[in-house]
Amino acid sequence: MSDTSTRFTSILIANRGEIACRVIRSAKSLGYRTVAVYSEADSNAVHVQMADDAVCIGTGPVNESYLLADKILDAARQTGARAIHPGYGFLSENADFAQACVDAGITFIGPSAEAIRLMGNKAEAKRRMIEADVPCVPGYEGIDQSDETLLCESEKIELPLMVKAAAGGGGRGMRLVHEREELANTLQLARAEALSAFGSDELILEKAIIEPRHVEVQVFADSYGNTIHLGERDCSVQRRHQKVIEEAPCPIMTESLRERMGAAAVAAAKSINYRGAGTVEFLLAANGDFYFLEMNTRLQVEHPVTEMITGLDLVELQIQVAQGEPLGLTQSDIQLQGHAIEVRLYAEDTAQDFLPTSGPIHLWSAPTGEGVRVDTGISSGQEVSPFYDPMVAKIITYGSTREVARQRMVEAMNSTLLFGTKTNRDFLKDCLQNEVFIAGEATTAFIGDEFPAEKLAEQAPAFSSDAIAAVIELQLQHQQDFANSVNVAAALKNWSNATPLRSRKRYQHGDETVDLWITPTDKDGYTVSDDERSCQITILSIEETRVKLLLENRKTEARYHKQGDTLYLSVDGISSSHRDEIPFDGQLDQNTGGGNIIAPMHGQLLEIKVQQGDHVKAGQTLAILEAMKMFYEIVAEADGKVTDILAQAGTQVAAEELLIQLETAQ
């Protein structure tokens, strides 16, 4: 029986975006009143619109809004919320916040502050797991954090080794070291990144397990001593140590290995008297050995794949346990059925080493269909903010087999649209269609091995895409002309009593220029050609964002959006953007190229490492930028001399803002 004096009827969600939307959805389905908190940058966000009540808690930066525990607790008091769900990220693994909730008489929907504190520090967690006989990776997790000690202890660890932030996760404060000479600088960067992201610069060192699988086990426990696991998830497809594709179950899992890993995960949870949802992460070596990596004392981003194969709502279970009710499940009740895959749609430029991007969302269209689920918190007309994580949506597919789930995901990717800001959609599709992934053989080395820089380089659109874009632009221009002239009949479109009227479009894709002539062949038909190529296009129908056409003799469909001078296009699941350069002839971009160093994205300029008059070498770090929770080194592309510094450390800079000018060597 639960204690009715502590029961709650309203829940404040101390998070944003798809996380808050996910929690609100389950809470509302159970009849709870929901309260959102939001920053000024999120005033029109979807999660704010979904909630029954909402409170603004500060400006855009997280340390001025979503990380302010006092503001969140005040919002709970203002709205009468007796429970707080922290989501995942932000304060979800902050022991002080969990304790502050309890002290304020508010139920924290998560584990105890003590459990969070124990597992929130990788060094302490690893020491505890060693005591509990859970297999751990060899390394250093000691209290002495001096550089001298870390450098000394590193000599005992076989290379390559990992430097990790003891207080965090998600790839922040984590660096791989191949050469010992790199370690001193790596320690400095990892400390700074960890301190910024987690408020602690404590580090641990570990031997890098080469090409393992990253496999995690979902555990659940109540206040009555019942602890079970809900199977495993394979999260091996990663970049910058952040997960990109997850699936359940693990493609190579055996019943024996699942039993052993599950038992280790349950033992880890029991050893700290855990309550609620948690995830025990392991590295799985090729020989079947596995090692404790960390325990996340919260719900995971990838929890939907577990929900799909177990039929359970994990947020509902969290609320149930937080209300003081028993879990109501035993290990034998957990039956895994079918297969589920999740991909993370990030706003990022895969061709630029997965650099996060921010900017407008001109058009967002989520996929639908059997076995398809989408968790997101965005909508058309919003912005991808530079203040927050670049993940904008999760697409999940389910099937009776892994191959059915994979095929459904490929089709879901084809119909996923986000026009306005670069995303990793096309890259995700490439991963899903890669033979190594299809075979279920992907390890944490998958992206590095299968997608070298030249394969990630931005490709110019196919000639057919340029041709389709040109015809769509012409059709849109015709529509505008007809709308502006009541005396021009649509039947006269493309009509001429002389030779056919030709139009010209010129698109620039990197260094490649495509100069096109578009010649009408009839009312809705066109020949599009350049000096070497030609194709026939007939428009069958054109709607606001969708066009059906014949490309040569093949019937196909494209999605598009015209924003200003740019036409965004998706054909056969491949995205591209097209701007006619002819109206801009003679206009040169004065801010890029040569010796001008620009900001790659919006962020805070933490440090400028050079002074006016300095001579620098190609590859030398000039400045360090913090953006979207990561640190980026801005380097010189050529030898030169610093002639001017136009930005100031400690200030916010915009994408493509000129920071430093170099006089480069000729």
Image (cartoon, helix red, strand yellow):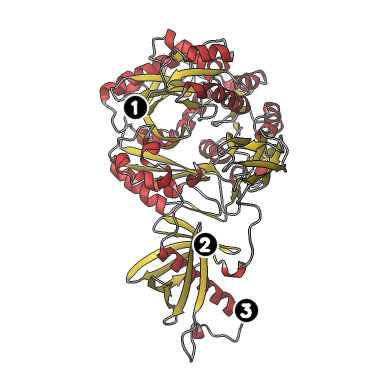
Residue 618, position in %: x, y? 56, 39
Name the N-terminal-most of marks 3 and 1: 1
Callouts 1 and 2 close, C-beta under 8 Å: no
- Identify which residue is drawn at 65% across, 37% down: 615
The residue under label 2 is which amino acid type? Gln
| Front-most of residues 562 and 661 | 661
Q: Can you identify the residue that label 1 sits on?
A: 334
Read off the residue under disc 3.
484
Residue that protrudes farthest toward the front in the picture? 666
Q: Which residue is mark 2?
A: 508
Query: Horizontal and vertical percent for residue 408?
Result: 35, 48
Residue lying farthest to the top in this orientation: 131
Measured from the top left, where is residue 472 in percent x and y? Answer: 49, 69
Instruction: Give above or below for 89 relative to 556.
Output: above
Residue 43 on image: x %, y %:
67, 45
Height in image: 172 above or below 204? below
Query: Considering depth in this image, is 643 or 590 the residue closer to the camera?
Result: 643
Residue closest to the eye, 33 or 649: 649
Asked which quadrant contains residue 60, the reply is top right
Could you tell whether 68 is left or right of 280 in the image?
Answer: right
Q: Residue placed farthest to the bottom in the image?
A: 497
